[in-house]
Image (tube, rainbow, N blue to C red):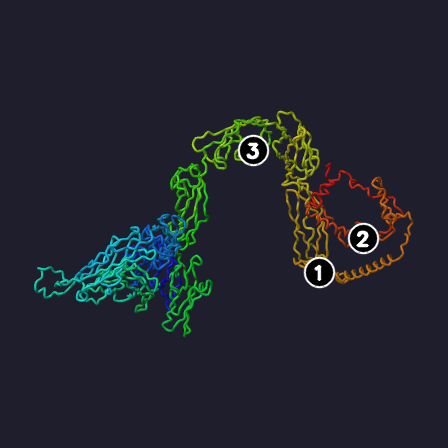
Amino acid sequence: MGCGTIVRFGVIAVLFQMGLGHWVVPPALLPENSRGPFPAKVVQIKSLQQLEMTYQINGEGADLDPKGVFIIDKSSGWISVTQSLDREKKASYRLTVHAKGTSMNVEEKPLEIFINVIDQNDNRPEFTQNPFNGSVTEAAGRGDVFMQVTATDADDPNTYNAEVWFSIISQDPPVPKMFGINNKTGEIFVQETGFDKEICSKYTLTIQAADLQGQGMSTIGSAIITITDSNDNAPQFEKSSYTVSVPEHKVGAVVARLPVTDEDEPGSPAWSTKYRIISGDENEFFNVSTGPSQLEGIITIVKPLDLEKNKQFVLSVIVENDDPFVGALPTATTTVTVNMKRYIRMPIFGNENYRMGEVTWLQLRQIRLSYLVPNGFTEDSSCTPGFDLEEFIFKVHRDHLPKGKQIGRVVFNNCDGRTRALFQSADKRFAVRTDGIVTLKRQVTLYEHHKMFAIHAWDSSGKKHTVSVRVVESPSDGLVLTFPKSAKRQKREWVTPDSSFPENSRGPFPAQVVQIKSDFVKETPMTYTITGEGVDVDPKGIFTIDQQGWIYVIQALDREKKASYKLTAHAKGTYMNVEEKPRELVINVIDQNDNRPEFVQNPFNGNVPEAAKNGDVFMQVTATDADDPKTYNAEVWYSIVSQDPPVPKPMMFGINEITGGIYVKEASLDRLVCSKYTLTIQAADLQGTGMSSTGSAVITVTDSNNNAPQFEKPSYTVSVPENKVGVVVARLPVTDEDEVGSPAWSTKYRIISGDKNGFFNVSTGPSQLEGIITTVKPLDFEKTRQYFLSVIVENDEPFVGALHTATTTVTVNVQDVNEPPEFIPKEKTISVAEDIPVGSDLVTFTATDPDTAKTQIITYKISSDPQNWLSITETGLVKVIKEMDREALVNKDGKYKVIVLAMDDEKPPATGTGTLVIDLQDVNDNRPYIVEKSFKTCNRDSTPVLLSIMDKDGDPFGTGVFISMITKLDQDDYHLILNVYDKDGNAQDCTVKASVCDCAGDAVQCNEKLVAGMPLFGVLGILGGILALLLLVLLLLMFMRRSGKKEEPLLPDDDVRDTIYYYDEEGGGEDDQDFDLSVLHRGLDNRPDVFRNDVAPTFLPAPMYRPRPANPEEIGTFIDDNLKAADTDPTAPPYDSLLVFDYEGGGSEAGSLSSLNSDSSGPDQDYDFLHEWGPRFRKLADMYGGGED
């Protein structure tokens, strides 16, 4: 691949600006067959004039044919391509760009641009003939080459796209495999010996020619090989010698005809003959060839004979067959004696075309008199026809050569004085005129630095001469695509897209990609380096750069592995401290069609009913292609290659070439004739013309529905209990004669009459041959006692033709079932005040019995009454038995729900359920309370403290009160009793702890309180030491007591403390229910006089106990606050005085306490308030407040 920057559409790359560096860019390269979108940007021309410029282009593809391919944006300079290009139609375009000032008379010098079209593999090989015919003898040996197939490819011959390789696809008859083929040359050779003409006289080979070295687009051809007899009979001359006479100087004259005979098979290589002169013609004056009959040798003169030099020639001629002899056979020869005759020379006019009688004597003096021999040969017999040189070298200045360009001249000397000859070029892109001028038949791009081909010429005797021609590229300065500098150093440069390089290039490597050049090179040598992907970043070692700034690729690229490379170019002075700013370069890999489509599975399986119609699509095949999805290289189309078996028609199916959908093409499928077809499917890219893969689609022809299913019985009678949903009513078996398991055999069912309200459903059973009727709604015996259902059966597949549809009748008798009473409505809502008196009638909530045929008595019972507020009579009258509270936790939005049961008198009874919702209207029955239990404030300049007041009643929900200090107080805790009441006068006293701190303002901070001039923590420390000392003394006494001798108690045996000393005495048991608790106080009444102080100190505030909170979540705080209040209350036991605990009196009159009944407080105690204390107290509420339950 030659040097060049391949343009990718629409991307502007980095440009080394003036004074820094610039690109040296070869002609722009565009891939053919682009999918667009169009117009697509190619390259931008931009003048560095600080003026508004207008740009124009002309030339091929612009205003010359083919016109309109390229356009330019007049203001921006962007050149765009307007359509897809085809390299095989035109391989290169030559454009000229002009730039003029829009408003000023400024004009740049025109710039020439070449745009070359990069080849894509869009042409498949074509055999030069089809079929090829050849023959091979029975005695041929292994490896013998006997024929050759050839194919051409219209793609670029310098790429793999046109490198055609050959392979044998099949042989008929198939076994054994007798032949092989040279995959590069197409030569067919013998692979296995043992031919026998009597067993098989002819073979047909299917040959594939594929480009991309056999991996690309392919074409199929055939080679017909005939097995011939072996050459076991040598040909024989009819005469052993001949004598003939010929005139001198007569070239091309027939000297003699030498007939032969051969007993081998006529027309075979063992029968056809060839001849050689083996002696008597050392100077090659004669030639012997095979005549048209194949059994005759013809001797002709190829050089002028001269009687003065040779009067006679004695020639010895041998005859052979095209096939070698089998075994040792004598070769026939004959002798031909050639005698010379003199030819009288006559003067004739030379090259002028004058006729006798038309020439004057004066003209005769002016005409050169020549002595010529026939056919124009001169008498100089020392001349040898041939080319002047062994190799001609033509130099061109660029790698893009337009059509019709003359690149050089070859010189051929025919030894007859003529300056023209018949030439032929082995490379079809070049033509050679009769004067030897070599021209181009079409546009050519030299992708290598040179190109070699051969030219053939024939002399007057018909002998072929060949010479080698080498086309050498001699690069000129025209590769630097910059506008030339004018006297004012005005200049414009390319704005170049990303560089590109095609994948799978054949090289040679390293191949030039693009050149970086710094303007500093005019002052000092520069050193160029590159970094990035493909250099020092994986994959490493793909690109290199030389000291001229040329970037090379050193190996073939693969777009499917990496689609682009990002490089950074650097330029530094070799001897001077100068450096260019690094520039980024992106090299994109252009996709080639080097991946064939692959089917996502193989085989594909599908079914088609035999009654399918033309155009019915029943399956789809799909294939993927790894090439660029934005190009035609990955656009896969489908086709059917073959159908097996080809009955009843060879093309029963068609395929959508774009989607791969397979459809019925001939609506004459018959499962009995053929139940399965195998299609060979081809998937080819380039919209079906490129590389291809084959897969298979196996199509099973299924049975069409030509037999209707039939019920086994015409009618059924069944009984079903009412109110049952999902119960099986009846099973309806059917039969079907179609193919088991097919859609024509499986069944489905419908109820066509008798069920207008949708009480029943019919479905298909697991066996596919049974209809199952079930109930989907409750049946009501009191409304409908009998149903007559008409059921129809069909197949999953529609019937083919007019078939009778089977039906059956199902009589359903509804059985009466005892149904529970029904509340109407199921949920009833009433509204009453929450303070309705106990004993009041609330509402009558009754149910009706749906069993109208029966006379039943309905009784009522409350199933759920969370607060036990209500009762119900047998007639359904609901009464209030406890006070109701709207603020109870069980109520939601003031609504209280009760579940009522209605039971009939059947055995067992049927029970219906109803819900009674009581909307309790709010009554002002809750006293307001203060939320905060304590607060802190300063005793100087303090702001009022806001206390929140809440009321559980509906209105008002709450308010607040400000507390402020009137007189200054000492630092201490004070208990305030506040009387809070609502608008109706409901009031209660609330205690709030006020902590007064010795501080000012809102920065509340309490200091340590001094006790006797000492801080409190000091006093506490002293007390703690005393307590520790006392504890130590007590432990010592206990130790001494345990270590001493145990003595009997000093008290008498009848002392009451004896009951405590002996732990096994537990009283009289559970039967001692009549006891007197007063004896328990006897010890206290007889206790010795001790000091007690049960008068509240005058310096302490009186403690206030907090009432029971309304919010259950505050129970914990309620207990803590009241416990603290009790601890500071001197009037509450235990008294704040020294008590005696070890004196229990002189005796005990009390019995055992084990029989105390926790219910002794009486059944009228109300424990419902425990529900409000949270989940932990709910169990106690249920135990003590559960009523009869």
Query: Which quadrant of the figure has residue 378?
Result: bottom left
What residue is shown with label 2? 1136
Disc number placed over residue 1007 in the picture, else none: 1
**Can residue 708 be seen here?**
yes
- The N terminus, quarter of image: bottom left
Comparing 770 with 945, the one in front is 770
Comparing 37 with 539, the one in front is 539
Contact check, label 2 and label 1, Cβ < 8 Å: no
Disc number placed over residue 64 in the picture, else none: none
Give x and y (percent) for residue 365.
Answer: 10, 66
Secondary structure at numbered mark 3: loop
Residue found at x 63% / y 29% = 819
Secondary structure at numbered mark 1: loop
| Measured Cα–Cα span from mark 1 to mark 3 | 81 Å
Number of marks present in the image shown: 3
Disc number placed over residue 776 in the picture, else none: 3
Question: Of callouts 1 and 3, which one flags the residue occurring earlier in the amino acid sequence?
Answer: 3
Contact check, label 3 and label 2, Cβ < 8 Å: no
**For this view, does 1077 lie left or right of residue 808?**
right
